[in-house]
Image (cartoon, rainbow, N blue to C red):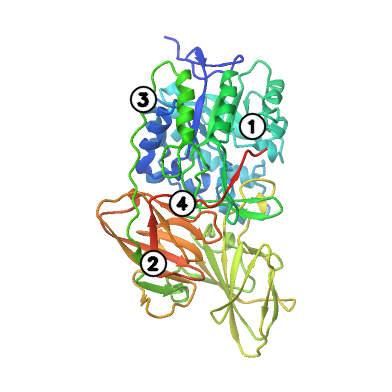
Amino acid sequence: MSAKKGLRADSTHFTLEGAPFLILGGSIHYFRVPRAYWRDRLLKLKACGLNTLTTYVPWNLHEPERGVFLFQEQLDLEAYIRLAGELGLWVILRPGPYICAECDLGGLPSWLLQDKKMKVRTTYSGFTSAVNSYFDNLIPRITPLQFKNGGPIIAVQLDNEYGSYAKDKQYMSFIKEALLSRGISELLLTSDNHKELKNGGVDGVLQTVNMQNLSNDGLQHLATLQPNKPLMVMEFWPGWFDVWGGLHHVFAAQEMISIVRQLLDRGISINFYMFHGGTNFGFMNGANYDGNYRPQTTSYDYDAPLTESGDYTTKYYLLRSLLSTYNKKPLPEPPAVQSRRAYEPVVVSHYISLWETLQCTETHFRADDPISMENLPANHSNGQSYGYTLYQTDIHSGGELNSRKHVHDRALVFIDRELIGVLDCKTQTVKISHSKSKRTLSLLVENLGRVNYGSAMDNQQKGISGDITLEDVPLKKFSMYCLDMKTSFINRLQSQKWMSVGQKPTYPAFFRGTLVVDKPTDTFLKLPNWNKGVVFVNGRNLGRHWSVGPQKALYLPGPWLRSGDNEIMVFEELNAAEKIHFAENPEYGKTISVPIE
């Protein structure tokens, strides 16, 4: 018997197993959805009338330290792909190595930046050797799951939107060969925004376009570039992501459906990015830079057809109604929605000042000059990827403290543990009162998210990346503490001496309380009258909270809770309230309409 034919792009329409095939895809990222809910979300995707799952693969999560590969539990990519196959879905895999995806550094591991000559997304040897090592581990996990081997993977994408970067004409050929030489044999794709299509292709690889509306002629441009090939919108954006201090992006459901209907009427394949956005748990989020630095929120709701917590929306039902006409069989019934509840508020019982927790750090470092997070000798010499770093030095005078734009991304400035100001991308100076006595200057610097898109990716060192001056004289002799707030650190805090909240806290500080649960259920955690920090539930990093909004509630999945006592811990930089609140529904703040051109 001849081998079954996989996805082909030999004419103006796709074929699969030799028959015409319209790709109706939806993006759901396994790393943004609690594993306990993978099946639920994929069943909801299928019940909407979609036939294909797409997902990125984040290198930075799978190889957090050089040569240390994580593919278990929440990061079990193979289990996720197999599950999609079991449910009757095809898979388009987007393994990068760069993925964008509003992930820190576009999904690239921060340890790459230890190399001062690093040129990411090029054929620079320091980058290609790291990619080869990663692909040596990743690709053998994928190849058995390809269509030709009886698996659900029908196509694989090279990198992501390289046309908007395009710093090395040999790079995409390198990625193509890296995949082919390791046994990838299904259809290869690239995807680019319409303006960058001319710079993003590579010979023998099908190009697709990313877009949100039909006014930019992206499809016509694609058809001209690739005559007699099927057209596909690899990323159709049904919403958009949010940034801290901005508004919540929404895309009107009727307007979206009108565009989708036109695409389908023309026989154009489509993938919804995102079909279900999920959550940037922990410190996963990236940032935008357009002259202004804009870190993304913990929520990745995206105003997608399925909400952050997996609820159906008007978009979902309209889309399901439309797609039912493109399916030969009746669509399966959508699964029931998870219940949610607003738990009673948790009263904060104890706190411990950050200054009292420094002994719980793995170790601290001393150097004449401040060292960036990535270059700290932490995490087996892989540097620090996420969280905060505390920099301390003694001063014997006052005047103007100047960051010289070397603070990334935000620093709380203390004199003898008393807050005197904040440094960030917009504020480079803080006045320090004059005194001849020795005082301790402390800067608590936070990585708010490395830029994930654009030309600035080689320069995403966080912490303090160069000299900072006092009255134009560079400061020296620093002690540095790595506060990446991993689970091991949070667990070590338990053995420290916590104070009852009757006493006035010294900020920054960790606060804790106990949530008693009978039956674990999804909820949203809210912190009215708190300011900024990070939330941990039973030792797991839920994500950042920040009063600037737009997001005012953090999604807390039921599977992260347990029957009985649950510890809620909040790291708070400036101001805590007496209680931690819960709500049944999210609060994403004031809205602004897209589309994005």
Comes first in the chain, label 4 or label 1: 1
Question: What residue would you read off at disc 2?
Answer: 579
User: Considering only vertical position in the picture, is 254 above or below 414?
Assistant: above
Percent x, y of residue 321: 46, 25
Question: What residue would you read off at disc 1?
Answer: 213
Comes first in the chain, label 3 or label 2: 3
Helix, strand or loop status at disc 3: loop
Question: What residue would you read off at disc 4?
Answer: 281
Helix, strand or loop status at disc 2: strand
Percent x, y of residue 192: 65, 33
User: Considering only vertical position in the picture, is 399 above or below 541?
Assistant: below
Comes first in the chain, label 1 or label 3: 1
- Image quadrant holding the C terminus, namely top right
Marks 4/1 in contact by CB < 8 Å: the verdict is no
Disc 3 marks which amino acid?
Answer: Pro
Say whether residue 260 is visible. Answer: yes
Comes first in the chain, label 3 or label 4: 4
Disc 2 marks which amino acid?
Answer: Lys
Question: What residue would you read off at disc 3?
Answer: 332
Marks 3/4 in contact by CB < 8 Å: the verdict is no
Say whether residue 380 is visible. Answer: no
Comes first in the chain, label 2 or label 4: 4
The span from disc 4 to disc 1 (Cα, nearest Å) is 30 Å
- For label 1, the crowd category at 10 Å Cα-Cα, with few meaning under 14, some 14 to 19 and many 20 or more, is many
Q: Nearer the viewer, residue 65 or 107?
A: 107
Disc 4 marks which amino acid?
Answer: Phe
Q: Residue at x 47, y 35 (%)?
A: 314
Query: For this view, does 539 lie left or right of residue 531?
Result: left
Marks 2/1 in contact by CB < 8 Å: the verdict is no
User: Considering only vertical position in the picture, is 568 above or below 590?
Assistant: below
Q: Residue at x 63, y 74 (%)?
A: 368
- Looking at this rendering, what residue extends furthest in the bottom direction? 436
